[in-house]
Amino acid sequence: MASSSQTPHFHPNPEKSKPFQRKTHNRRNVNFHWNLGIRKLTLRRSQGLSVLSSSSLSSSNHFSNSRLHGLCANGKLEEAVKLVASMRELRVSVDEDAFVALVRLCERRRAHEEGSEVYGIAMSSMSSLGVELGNAFLAMFVRFGNLVDAWYVFGKMSERDLFSWNVLVGGYAKQGYFDEAMCLYHRMLWVGGVRPDVYTFPCVLRTCGGIPDLARGREVHVHVVRYGYELEIDVVNALITMYVKCGDVKSARLVFDRMPRRDLISWNAMISGYFENGMCYEGLELFFAMRGLSVDPDLMTMTSVISACELLGDGRLGRDIHGYVISSGFAVDISVCNSLTQMYLYAGSWREAEKVFSRMERKDIVSWTTMISGYEYNFLPRKAIDTYRMMDQDCVKPDEIAVAAVLSACATLGDLDTGVELHKLAIKARLVSYVIVANNLINMYSKCKCIDKALDVFHNIPRKNVISWTSIIAGLRLNNRCFEALIFFRQMKMTLQPNAITLTAALAACARIGALMCGKEIHAHLLRTGVGLDDFLPNALLDMYVRCGRMNIAWNLFNSQKNDVSSWNILLTGYSERGQGSVVVELFDRMVESRVRPDEITFISLLCACSKSQMVKEGLMYFSRMEEYGVTPNLKHYACVVDLLGRAGELEEAHTFIQRMPVTPDPAVWGALLNACRIHRDINLGELSAKRIFELDKESVGYYILLCNLYADCNKWREVARVRSMMKENGLNVDAGCSWVEVKGKVHAFLSDDKYHPQTKEISTVLERFYEKMSEAGVTKTSSMGETESSRDEIFCGHSERKAIAFGLINTVPGMPIWVTKNLSMCESCHETVKFISKTVRREISVRDAVHFHHFRDGECSCGD
Ligand SMILES: [Zn+2]
Ligand SMILES: [Zn+2]
C-alpha cells in the first residue's frame, strides 16, 4: 500500500499478453521461452545485412540517421516512424542510437502501435539486439504490459545488464505473475551472476508479499543483508510491506524499529500493516507516536486511520480523529471525507455522517454510494431513496452498489414506483447484468407482491448464485406460491449448495403447504452438514413439524435442543391451534419454571388457547398478569380477550371491554367481536362491528367474508348479496381455493376449479359415492342450502380439500392417515363431509386451514365444532 505510489503504472495490453492471462505460476513456461530466444538469436546471426556494407550508401546513411535523431528530439513520432519505414525499404541501415531514441519516444507517448511497428522493423534489420536498444524495447513493452514481446526481446539480447533483469522482474511482479518473477530473480542471481541493486529488491519483495510466501520473503531479506542494502530506505520499506502482507507483523515492526531513518512511506507501511492484520489499536498507537514525533501524515495515513476507527466502532475515537482531520486541513479532501462518512455510518452515528456529507464541496460516486448504503444499513430506507433522488439531480450516474442499496430500500418500503424506475435505469445503464442488482430486483418485486416480475428477472440472470435462488424461493413463499418455491428449491439443489437462509425459506414453504417429506429431507441435510444448526434453523424446523401436524416429532426435537422463547412460542402456538388449552397452560407454567421469559407472542398463544377451550376465567387471569412478566398488552392481546369473551357468548361484556380499552381499537379487535357475533348470530352488534371495521379498513377480504357468513347463517341472503357487491366495487377478490396433500413424499396441489388433474374422473366418482351415502344416512348435505349459500361456500371455501382427500384415499393404502393443508377456511359443509368420510373409511384425516387445525377421527373433529 505504502510503496505503490512509487512505481510507474503499466497498462496491460490484453490482446498481446494473452498467454499470460491465465495465472499459471508455471516455472517450466519460463525455461522454455528462455531457450527458444537464444536459439533464434544464433540462427539469425549468419544472415547479416549485406547491402549495408556497400560504401556508396554510407553518406545517405549518415544523413537519414541524423534526420531521425532530429525528429525524435522534436517529438515528431509519426514522421520518425515513416522515415524508419522508408529507410528499411531502401535498405538504409539505422543506427542503434537512433532506434533507441525512437523507442523511448514511443514509450513516453504510450504509442502501442508505433512501438510494435518500430520493433518489427528493428527485428527484420538486425541480427541481435545490443544492451541499450534491448533495454529500451524491454522498458517499452513492460510499460505497455506486453510481457510476451518483452520476454522475446530479453531472449534476443546478446548481452544483458542489471537494468534488463530489473525491468523484467518488475514487469512480471506488477502483473501478478509472482512465480515467474521469483524464478527470474533466482536466474539473475545464480545463472546471470548479476548483483541485485536498490531497484531489484522492492520488486522481488513485492512478489513475496503478493504470493504471499514468508519463507521466500525471509530468504530475500537475507540477500538484502548480504548485498549490503539494509540501510537503503526504499528497500527496508519494501521489507516492512512484505512482512505485513505475509502476516508477520512482529518481524515488520522489528525491521521498522531498527531503521535509523524513516520516511512517511515507512510510517504508512507499518501503520496500515497493523490495520490490515486486524491490530487496530496497535496501529493507532503508532499513529499517535508518529504525531508525537511531529511527522505529518498524508492522505493515505488519514484514510487508513479513519477506516481503522470504523472497524473498531469506537465513536469517541472517531470524533477525535475527525477533529484532527479538520485542524490539519485534510477536511477538503474527498477521499478523507468519504472515509469519515463511512466511519460514522457504520458506527450508527448517521447524523454525524450527514454533517460531513453536507459540508463536502465536491461529491463523487463513492460519496453518494456510501451515504445511500449507509442509510440502508441504519434502517433508514426513506432517506436512502431521498439521497438517491438528490444524486440524480446532481447528474451523478449511480453504480451497481448504489442501485442495489436503493432497491433494497424500495423493498422495505414497498415502494414499487421507485423500484420500477430503478429497474428501467438498470437496464439502460447495463447494471442488471450485476447479480447483486438482479437479486435486489427479485427481492423488491417479491415484497411489492409482483412475483411474476420477480420471476422474469430471475430467469434472465445468466449466472444465478445462491442468493439469486434464495431470493426467488423466499419471494415465492412470501407470495403464497409455496408449491413452486419447493420446485425451485429442488432445481437449485442440483447445482448449488443452499445456505442457512435458503433452507429457512424452504422450510417455511414446507410448513405452509404441509410438505412433510421435503421438510424431512431438509432436516436430514442439516444433520449431515451441520449448516446453521446453532442458528435460527432449529426453530424453523420445529415450526415445520408443528405446522405439518407432527406434534410428536416436534416434541422430541424440542426436548433435544437448546430452546429460546421462540421455540416455546412455536410449540405453544401449535397446541393452541389444536384447541388444547389445558396443554398450553401446562406448557406455559413449565416455560416460566425453566426461566425463559415469556414475550408478546407467548401471551397471544396463551390467550388464543384459553379462548378456543372456553377457559374464560384462566384467560382473563393471564391477561391481568401480563405486566408481571414485563409484557405490556398491545392491540393483538386486546383482540384475544374480545375473542375469549365473545366465543363464550358474553358479547355485551366483550363490547364493554372494547369501549373501556386504554388504546383506540383497530379493525382486528372489532373483527374478533364480529366473529363472535357470527358464532352467536347477533346481527345488531355484528353490523356495528362491521361499520367500525370498514371505517378503518376497506381492503381486507376476511372481514367481508365474516359479515357475509353472519348474514348467511341468519338466512339474510339479500344482505349477503349486498356485501358481495361491496367487495366487487372495492375490487376485492378471494384467493382461489387450493389444497395440498402429500402422497408418497410428493405434494399434489388441488385448485377449486381444477378440471385438468389426470385423476379428476376417479376423484369425482369417489366423492359422488360419499354424497350418496351421506343422503342415505340422512346427514344434512343439501337440506337447508339455498343457491346463494352454496355459491358463497364455493367462493369462500372452494371445497378444494375434498378433492385432495379423495386423491389421498385413492392413492394410499387403507388405514393410512391423510394430511391436507388448505389456504382458505373450511366451510361447514366441508367440515360435515370430512367428518362423515373419516367415519366411513376409518381413517384419520387432518386438515389445516387458514385458521384452525382439524383432526378428524371416527366422525368427530378435534376442533369440537
Ligand atoms: Zn367447503
Ligand atoms: Zn374441525
Image (cartoon, rainbow, N blue to C red):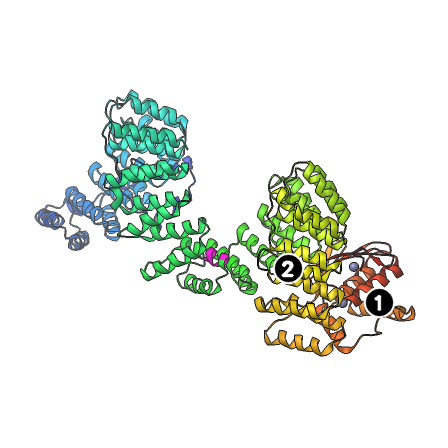
Secondary structure category for the residue under label 2: helix
Question: SS at mark 1?
Answer: helix
**Is residue 739 visible in the rendered structure shown here?**
no
Ligand 2 visible in quadrant: bottom right
Q: Quadrant of the C terminus?
A: bottom right
Name the residue tied to disc 1: 766
Please tell me which residue lies in front, 230 or 194. 230
What is the magenta segment's predominant secondary structure? Answer: helix
The residue sitting at 28% across, 50% down in the picture is 360
Q: Amino acid type of disc 1?
A: Val
Looking at the image, residue 864 sits to the left or right of residue 199; the answer is right
Q: Earlier in the sequence, mark 1 or mark 2?
A: 2
The x and y percentages for residue 266 are 28, 30
In the picture, the disc for residue 658 is 2
Q: Is residue 787 magenta?
A: no
Asked if residue 19 can be seen in this view, the reply is yes
Numbered disc in front, either 1 or 2: 2
- Gap between marks 1 and 2, in whole Å? 48 Å
Instruction: Indicate the quadrant where residue 166 lies.
Output: top left
Q: Which amino acid type is marked by label 2?
A: Ile
Q: Nearer the viewer, residue 678 or 52?
A: 678
